[in-house]
Amino acid sequence: MRVKDNGHLTIGGCDTVDLAAQFGTPLFVYDVEWLRGRIREILAATRKSKVRVKVSYASKAFCTTAICQLVHDEGLSLDVVSGGELYTALQAGIPPAEIHMHGNNKSWAELEFAVSSGIGLVIVDNFVELGMLSDVAERMDRHVDVLLRIAPGVEAHTHEFISTGQQDSKFGFDLESGQAKHALEQLSQYPRLKCVGLHSHIGSQIFEPQGFTAAIERMVGLYKTGLQLRLPFQILNLGGGFGIRYTDEDKPLSFDVYMDAIESTLTSACKELGINIPQIWLEPGRVIVGPPGTTLYTVGTKKSIPGVRNYVSVDGGMTDNPRLALYGAKYDAVLANRMDEVWDNPLIDEGGSRPGERWSVAGKCCETGDMLIWDAALPHPNPGDILAVFSTGAYNYSMASHYNRNPKPAVVFVENGEAKVVVERETWADLVRQDRPLR
Ligand code: LLP
């Protein structure tokens, strides 16, 4: 991202004011070079490690045909969590063998779709699914590679709604009560399922390696049990969850730090138990697509309550970014057409005068909680200004809704001064397409 002489923010060499004019707002803009760079950084860190590491992209963070193709071009495999994500990945041309499927309640139809497509691996979440998947494999005369998802009883220090590894969670076989071990013992009843290892995911937006190392310490014991039961174990999947910077409060770690911690903990834990070091699989989502994504909005109305607060409303909101409403998430924003006026924006080192004003950015939905940012440091906004909210590449488009019958925004990929639409903006006609009138 850069600022042009005219004070406009540019992303991937494109003037954001022009992007807003050409494609309309709200608009998701992804900086492709940045995105590829993040994947390459992660892969470089994993290649330095003595442990064998495979990385797949958790497509739930942002799943469209184009992003599936891009991450696959960069050498990642793909995690999907529903029939819809699987369909998208297959349409994108991802080889089925490089797709893995998650989910705590996969339907018969989803399991049949996964098995008939020949996807690489299914991460089985619970006892019911073991039986269902085995049935499907039997009926289709297939063998299926699986990992068992384990709840390792590790508390990740993040928002409780995105913390998943603790014992009291809907995900996975519980380790502490012996349920996980019991599942391994039952596997011999399912000859169509080949269990190649274990999986855990402790949560999302994590800023310390301790959660991962604690998970390793707990999982290797169970891994050894699997080997003793003569299961063909090779893989320990540690999930995703690597935190990113939304505001200055967030201090992300480099991937090297995670890899060092994972390597040393894994090596010593395996040595202690006298087992070979498994392959490590990681499933990052947010850390890949979050920072390179920016949302552009057009400023509409505003309201100042003397002595209380200034509100400015934009043409999107919780329909394209529900993260403040859901998790109290915080974001940085700028007026993209007036960058020269903002002293403390993250892209300008000096110059300009810092506005003393604070503006709370509201969405356009009929709901008080529809806010994007509380008390942002912005120059006095005017209708027609373009507001850019940073780090909105993960869990924004993928969690977008039609609330209040708002169409979903367009998505553009920008690179070397060129913009390519990768998802068209929905129209009002799209909103009624599935409706069936009474008369
Ligand atoms: N693997 C599994 C099994 C997961 O459940 C998740 C995320 C990931 C990988 C990727 O995690 P990441 O690297 O992106 O943190 N909607 C929430 C985040 C929910 C995460 C769900 N699982 C948010 O907006 O913060």
Image: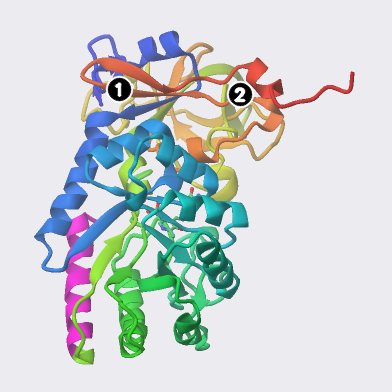
Q: Residue drawn 65% across and 40% down?
A: 369
Secondary structure mostly taken by the magenta-highlighted segment of the chain: helix
Mark 2 Cα-neighbour bin, 10 Å: few <14, some 14–19, many ≥20: many
Q: What residue did someone put label 1 on?
A: 414
The spot of residue 99 in percent (x, y) is 37, 51
Check if residue 388 falls in the magenta segment. Answer: no
User: Based on the displayed image, in which of its 4 quarters is residue 413 positioned?
Assistant: top left
Front residue of 13 and 338 = 13
Q: Is residue 251 visible?
A: no
Using residue 110 as the reference point, say whether residue 234 is left or right of it: left
Structural crowding at the residue carrying mark 1, measured as other residues with C-alpha within 10 Å and reported as few (<14), some (14–19) or many (≥20): many
Up the image or down, 348 lies above or below 135; here it is: above
Residue type indicated by callout 1: Val
Amino acid on which disc 2 is placed: Pro
- Viewport quadrant of the N terminus: top left
Q: Quadrant where the C terminus lies?
A: top right
**Residue 264 falls within the magenta-colored stretch:** yes
Spatial CA distance of label 1 from label 2 is 22 Å
Q: Name the mark on residue 407.
A: 2
Which of these two is toward me, 439 or 135? 135
The front one of 168 and 313 is 168
What residue span does the magenta drawing correspond to?
A: 249-271
Of helix, strand and loop, which one carries label 1?
strand
Question: At which x and y percent is residue 160?
Answer: 53, 63
The residue at 48%/44% (across/down) is 85
* Quarter of the view holding residue 148: bottom left
Q: Position of residue 243 (x, y in %)?
A: 35, 54
| Residue 302: percent from left, percent from top | 60, 20
First of labels 1, 2 by sequence position? 2
Taking the image in four quarters, ligand 1 sits in the one at bottom left
Q: Is residue 20 left or right of residue 439?
A: left
**As displayed, is residue 168 above or below residue 421?**
below
